[in-house]
Image (cartoon, grey):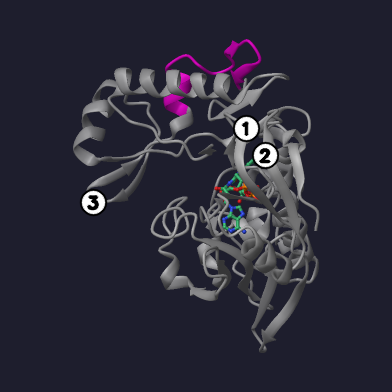
Amino acid sequence: MTIQHNFSLKKYNTFGIEAKAKEFVAVHSTDELKSVLQIHQKKPKFVLGGGSNMLLTQDIEALVIHIDLKGKKVFKEDDDFVWIESMAGENWHEFVLWTVNQNFGGLENMSLIPGNVGTTPVQNIGAYGTEIKDTFVSCEAMNIATQEMKTFAKEACHFGYRESIFKQEVRNQYIITSVIFKLTKRNHKINTSYGDITKELDKQNVITPTLKDISNAVIAIRQSKLPDPKELGNSGSFFKNPIISKVDFDKIHALHPEMPHYVVSENEVKVPAGWLIEKAGFKGKRFGDAGIHKNQALVLVNYGNATGQEILNVSKDIQATILKEFGIAIETEVNVI
Ligand SMILES: Cc1cc2nc3c(=O)[nH]c(=O)nc-3n(C[C@H](O)[C@H](O)[C@H](O)COP(=O)(O)OP(=O)(O)OC[C@H]3O[C@@H](n4cnc5c(N)ncnc54)[C@H](O)[C@@H]3O)c2cc1C
């Protein structure tokens, strides 16, 4: 467990931004995590998983703790379900593939999302009609100040759309060390309702899809739509899809009847931020090395040597334009540091 000084984070964030950590340490067990927190009690700390949901706009003047706790196991099982416990530093996609290969159902629609298992509850990750909250049972987390362990059951996590208690009430207070998921062993709930999954399965002549077929279909769709961070720096969807009041929606919809939307409740409607950004003319635009992806207006990209500040400026420009043109305030999904 060596502390490294003035450590480059370029390879530790999927935007590929050059930023330095004043101090950096990778922890491989809860004991190591505990002793790092005890020894460096007084220092400000910053928790780093896979770096796939952050925009680094400056060097980090804190001790960066990279969560690298590995391991997974069957926690318990019955005839129908299996409870799997994974340590926080496991790579999410590899973990999903492992569950699919064991024929454990529930995570297959979230194949190929970058990042670590331990970060998945932070923003209640989701894709193709499934969210982590659908299979999440509980997580273990260490209190940064006291090093006491606490179990957060599902209800305590206050999961919402890309939201949880870890982004709100207990932000920067806990480090998640492991997560338990409840997955099906049989009678899997195959979910093909969202996006282009059915189209992709048709293309592959799959009539009765297995978990593996769903996972493969999701991987194929994502690879065709989203830039691979290894080739083009990005952090996935930069903004959340805004949820607006029905009253506001009706006004905007009257002017733009083609606007796609999704009714959330009697009084609320969700609008795709990507559509708003495209409509405002940003799709495919480039400002130096910062830009908006040519196929996915929701994805901001680093063409090479953009700084975090340059990408942030582009995002602010987009937000201001959407507010002016549609009266809608769009929030970032990515953590701006
Ligand atoms: C190409 C691409 C596609 C994506 N697609 C999706 C998608 O479909 N759906 C989706 O929901 N997201 C998506 N994302 C976003 C991202 O993959 C997820 O948010 C992921 O869970 C982030 O994990 P990470 O380990 O990389 O987090 P990091 O970026 O390392 O950290 C994110 C935040 O969580 C905190 N954190 C990290 N680890 C812990 C921990 N153990 N305990 C407490 N706090 C912690 C960090 O301090 C930071 O504030 C995508 C990203 C990319 C690059």
Amino acid at circle 3: Glu
Residue closer to the observer: 139 or 224 = 139
Amino acid found under the numbered disc labelled 2: Lys
Instruction: Tell me whether the residue at label 1 lies in contact with that at label 2, contact meaning CB atoms closer than 8 angstroms.
Output: yes
Question: Do labels 3 and 1 touch, CB within 8 Å?
Answer: no
The quarter of the displayed image where residue 60 is located: top right
Quickly name the residue at label 3: 266
- Mark 1 Cα-neighbour bin, 10 Å: few <14, some 14–19, many ≥20: some
**Label 3 CB sits under 8 Å from any ligand 1 atom:** no
Q: Residues within 10 Å of mark 3 (few under 14, many from 20)?
A: few
Q: Point out the tag, 3 or 1, that comes first from the N-terminus.
A: 1
Give the amino acid type for the residue marked by disc 1 in the picture.
Answer: Asp
The residue at which mark 1 appears reads as 59
Q: Which mark is residue 22?
A: 2
Residue 276 falls inside the magenta stretch: yes
Q: CA distance from mark 2 to mark 3?
A: 49 Å
**Residue 253 falls in image quadrant:** top left
Region rendered in magenta: 275-292
Q: Is residue 210 above or below residue 250?
A: below
Which residue is drawn at the image coordinates 49% and 54% (left, top)?
172
Looking at the image, is 151 positioned above or below residue 23?
below
